[in-house]
């Protein structure tokens, strides 16, 4: 999968691209991630990317021209088929992404992530450039960069062959509309607190039953809404 990020803060992405699973996925050729500085596409000498809102009001609005020019340069270069790519504008006004959305995004060939800023982005970007405006949750961040990193992380780990263990993207939280059961590792006793005995019996049927029961219990307590969700 190819991912292109359009941002006015390109250096924010270096830490996540250069570490851990995202780094490995790139080295293994599973993900090609390219970061583009929207400012490189401005036409004025001050490299201005914002302006005052029409109609008045506080704050500044991102101007359409550098965003369109940057996206058009990316699309021209990559020539990805429209049906196999998604252009997303990250904004708190967008539809909230869920695990199933990331699964569907992981099946596309090309993702273009546009990081919004300031009071907002000129609406023509959402209407005529992006396929969809998406949010990572009901809270407001200072810009779309952290949300874009969340999208990259959530999608890249789902790409075939990225996670070492084939099962680990399957049996986890949200996959079956359940929160994950508690996990333990050594030591068997830590500061007087013991690992549940069933996990040390080696009885796989009993362990599976215990995990199922615990998963249901924790989901009922913390996220009863998930149990009602029809997938
Ligand atoms: N930009 C600012 N807040 C955001 C959010 N919650 N999701 C996506 N983009 C954002």
Image (spheres, rainbow, N blue to C red):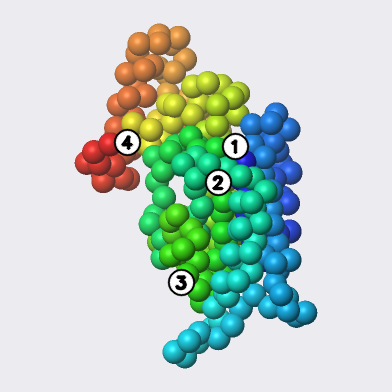
Nearer the observer: mark 4 or 2; the answer is 2
Residue at point 39%, 54% (across, down): 96
User: Which element is circle 3 on?
Assistant: helix
- Residue annotated with mark 1: 1
Nearer the observer: mark 1 or 4; the answer is 1
User: Which element is circle 4 on?
Assistant: loop
**Among the 4 quarters of the image, the one containing residue 157:** top right
Mark 1 or mark 3: whose residue is earlier in sequence: 1
Q: CA distance from mark 1 to mark 4?
A: 27 Å
Quadrant holding the C terminus: top left
Which label belongs to residue 123? 3
Q: Are marks 2 and 1 in contact (CB under 8 Å)?
A: yes
- Along the line of sight, which residue is nearer the eye, 201 or 135? 135
* Mark 2 crowdedness (10 Å alpha carbons): few <14, some 14-19, many ≥20: many
Quadrant holding the N terminus: top right
Q: CA distance from mark 2 to mark 1?
A: 8 Å
Residue most toward the right?
45
Q: Are marks 3 and 4 in contact (CB under 8 Å)?
A: no
* Mark 4 crowdedness (10 Å alpha carbons): few <14, some 14-19, many ≥20: many
35 lies above or below 58: above
Residue at point 48%, 35% (across, down): 107
**Among the 4 quarters of the image, the one containing residue 185:** top right
**Within 8 Å: ligand 1 and the Cβ of disc 4?**
no
Q: Are marks 1 and 3 in contact (CB under 8 Å)?
A: no
Q: In this rendering, does residue 22 appear at all?
A: no
- Residue annotated with mark 2: 111
Q: CA distance from mark 4 to mark 2?
A: 26 Å
């Amino acid at each position: 999968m190819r991912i292109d990020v359009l941002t006015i803060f390109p250096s924010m992405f270096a830490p996540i691209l250069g570490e851990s699973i995202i780094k490995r996925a790139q080295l293994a050729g599973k993900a090609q991630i390219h970061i583009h500085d929207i400012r490189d596409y401005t036409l004025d000498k001050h490299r201005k990317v914002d302006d005052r809102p029409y109609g008045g009001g506080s704050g500044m609005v991102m101007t359409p021209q550098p965003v369109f020019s940057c996206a058009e340069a990316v699309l021209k270069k990559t020539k990805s088929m429209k049906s196999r790519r998604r252009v997303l504008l990250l904004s708190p006004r967008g539809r909230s992404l869920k695990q199933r959305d990331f699964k569907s995004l992981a099946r596309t060939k090309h993702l273009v992530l546009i990081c919004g800023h300031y009071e907002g982005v000129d609406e023509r970007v959402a209407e005529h450039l992006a396929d969809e405006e998406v949010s990572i949750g009901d809270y407001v961040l200072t810009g779309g960069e952290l949300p874009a990193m969340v999208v990259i992380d959530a999608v890249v780990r789902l790409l075939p062959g990225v996670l070492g263990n084939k099962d680990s993207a399957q049996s986890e939280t949200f996959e079956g509309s359940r929160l994950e059961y508690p996990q333990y590792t050594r030591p068997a006793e830590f500061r007087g607190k013991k690992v549940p005995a069933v996990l040390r019996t080696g009885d796989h049927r009993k362990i599976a039953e215990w995990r199922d029961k615990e998963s249901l219990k924790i989901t009922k307590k913390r996220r009863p809404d998930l149990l009602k969700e029809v997938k």
